[in-house]
Image (cartoon, grey):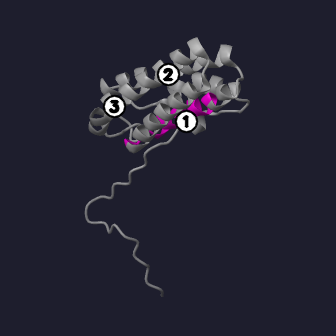
Amino acid sequence: MSVHTEFDKGSLLWVKAEIDSTLARASDALEQYRSNKDTAVLKHAKTHLHQAYGALDLVELTGLARFCDEVEQVLLVLEQGEHDEIGLPLVLRAIEEIGQYLNRLTIGMPNIPLALLPTFRELAQLRGACASGAELFFPQFVLSMPPGLPRKSTPLPLK
């Protein structure tokens, strides 16, 4: 596994059930919105997605958290009554992709959020924004110093 795709799988396993539950509640709220068009229900879905965002950020799945944030942004567009016919199915699909991505991570897939780029672009495009893969790419740079080398910067002696 590359240093760029590593994350603490134990932390994810610790919070995954809660994230799954939160995503399910968001999906349920969106299905309820589909039937009654009550925008208050969209606020509930947005709250649930924001909770998922926080948990994903906490376990340092920053790219996936950014994807979740983009889904939230589309919900703001839906609250304004725009793009229901396109946006609602797209948001439901994106939430499903978040869950599938988490499932794949738990069985050993590397953390490569760029796999979500096509949907990420669709979400951004729906709200009139431009999206690039750089927004999903948050490499984890860990500097391991060989034994015996100082860990702090030591000023060089002046001659």
Q: Nearer the viewer, residue 40 or 98?
A: 40
Mark identifier at residue 18? 3
Reply above or below: 150 against 80: below
Q: Nearer the viewer's eye, disc 1 or disc 3?
A: 3
**x and y percentages locating residue 153 in the rendered image:** 41, 72
Q: Residues within 10 Å of mark 3 (few under 14, many from 20)?
A: some
Mark 2 or 1, which is nearer the eye? 2
Question: To which residue does mark 1 refer?
Answer: 69
Residue 11 spot, x, y in % from top left: 29, 39
Q: Position of residue 35 (x, y in %)?
A: 57, 11
Residue type at mark 1?
A: Asp
Q: Give me the residue at 67% from left, 13% from top.
A: 85
Q: Read off the magenta span.
A: 59-75
Q: Nearer the viewer, residue 151 or 24?
A: 24
Which amino acid, mark 3?
Glu
Q: Amino acid at mark 2?
A: Ala
